[in-house]
Each structure stands twice: as structure tokens, then as C-alpha cells.
Amino acid sequence: MVRIAIMASGSGSNAEAIMQYFQNHNRIQVALLVTSNPKAFVIERAVKAGIPIIVIGKSIYDDGEKLNDLLRRFDIEYVILAGYLKAIPAPTIQSFPHRILNIHPSLLPHFGGKGMFGIHVHEAVVQARATQSGITIHFVTEEYDEGPIIFQQSIAVNPEWDAPTLQQAILPLEHFHYPRVIEEVINYSACK
Ligand code: GRF
């Protein structure tokens, strides 16, 4: 089994879609949920799915060696960021080359970078009157939101939409594609 960890800090709707997709999968197993937020709703979702949960504080999420130890203890091969709001420290990025994935709710490189998370992304898209938005799944590198893009899916933005409406239109795309792209990346690297 290829063991993956999900890291999330908020609601965890993507985490739930991933946990469901890989339930009873023959090759890939969600072996751990790591959260930086003890109050995150994602914890309830992981409890329901029967996934082990670890809540980490600053002394771990800021310390790549300690984070590596934790991930190693659970035999994690891939790390899946799903609304994780802390930066991944450099030693962890270096220990998991092309093995940390993130999803961003816009068409990177547009509307990415510092402060661009959650509803802020959609607010910026609406404010810019962009006609297209979508999702980007990418590898995580030390350059925030700039790692190699694996997959994008765009949608037309209705000019009458506000940011929450745009978010509602984009979330189902995330839930559908993220688990499938994770599966493809893992299968592809197994073939190499
Ligand atoms: C999603 O929009 C994802 O693209 C971004 O953070 C949000 C997390 O939402 N990285 P949820 O917690 O999975 O519902």
C-alpha cells in the first residue's frame, strides 16, 4: 500500500472527498490526517472516516525535521495539502520531492501567492472581472504557489456571480479532480 497523509486546517471538504475516494482502494491508503488547527471541522470528517489524526503546533509545523519524523513514523510516501494554511518547511519539501501536492482554487499563476487562500482568491477573481477561473493542482516547492503544475480545469465566470457563488461553482471541480489526479501521480511514479 502507498500511504498518504492529508494536511488540512479548515473545513476539509477536499480531505473528505479524498478519504472517500481512497476508501477500499487497492493500492493507495489515506493513513493520516495532520492538522494545524485543533478546532478544524476536518477533524470530525477524519473521525467519521476512521483516519488517525494528529494535531500539530508551531514547534512541529515550523520544524521540518520534526515534521519529517512524524511523517516517517507513519510511513508516509505522499503528502496532500487540502486547505492547509501553514507553510511547509524546506527540509520537508526536500525530503518529499514531487511527493507533496497542493490544490489552489484559481488558474495559477493568476490569483496565487501570499494572502491568496479561501474566499480571498474568489474575491480577487470577481474584483478583477476575470472571465475564467478554475482549479490548479501542483507540486509544492519552496516557491509558494509556484511549483510545477500537474493539472488545471477552467470554468467560465458568470459576471453576475459574487465570490461565494464562484467558490460554490469551483468546489465540486476540486472534489472531483483532486483524488483522481493524486491517483494518477502515484500510479505514474510507480511505473517509472
Ligand atoms: C479549497 O478551495 C482549496 O482549493 C484551497 O483551500 C480550500 C479548502 O477547502 N487550497 P476545504 O477545507 O477542502 O473545504
Image (tube, grey):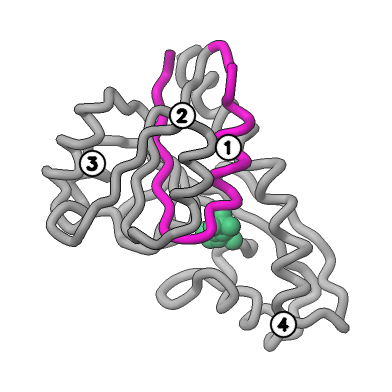
Q: CA distance from mark 1 to mark 4?
A: 28 Å
Tag 3, which secondary structure? helix
Quarter holding the N terminus is top left
Label 3 beta carbon less than 8 Å to ligand 1: no
Label 1 is placed on what type of residue?
Ile
Tag 2, which secondary structure? strand
In depth, the one of 147 and 85 nearer the eye is: 85
Are the residues at dot 2 and dot 1 in contact (C-beta closer than 8 Å)? yes
According to the image, label 3 marks what residue?
94
According to the image, label 2 marks what residue?
30
Q: CA distance from mark 2 to mark 1?
A: 8 Å
Q: Around disc 1, counting alpha carbons within 10 Å, would you say few (fewer than 14), some (14 to 19), or many (20 or more)?
A: many
- Magenta includes 15? yes
Q: Quadrant of ligand 1?
A: bottom right
Instruction: Tell me, for residue 18, which label it has, or none.
Output: 1
Instruction: Tell me, for residue 9, which label it has, or none.
Output: none
Residue at horizontal 71%, vertical 42%? 176
Q: Nearer the viewer, mark 3 or mark 1?
A: 1
Label 4 is placed on what type of residue?
Val
Q: Earlier in the sequence, mark 2 or mark 4?
A: 2
Q: Which residues are magenta?
A: 1-26
Q: Earlier in the sequence, mark 3 or mark 1?
A: 1
Label 3 is placed on what type of residue?
Gln
Instruction: Tell me, for residue 126, which label it has, or none.
Output: 4
Q: Around disc 2, counting alpha carbons within 10 Å, would you say few (fewer than 14), some (14 to 19), or many (20 or more)?
A: many
Q: Earlier in the sequence, mark 2 or mark 1?
A: 1
Position of residue 110 relative to residue 6, above or below, is: below
Position of residue 100 relative to residue 82, above or below, is: above
Label 2 is placed on what type of residue?
Val
Q: CA distance from mark 3 to mark 1?
A: 24 Å
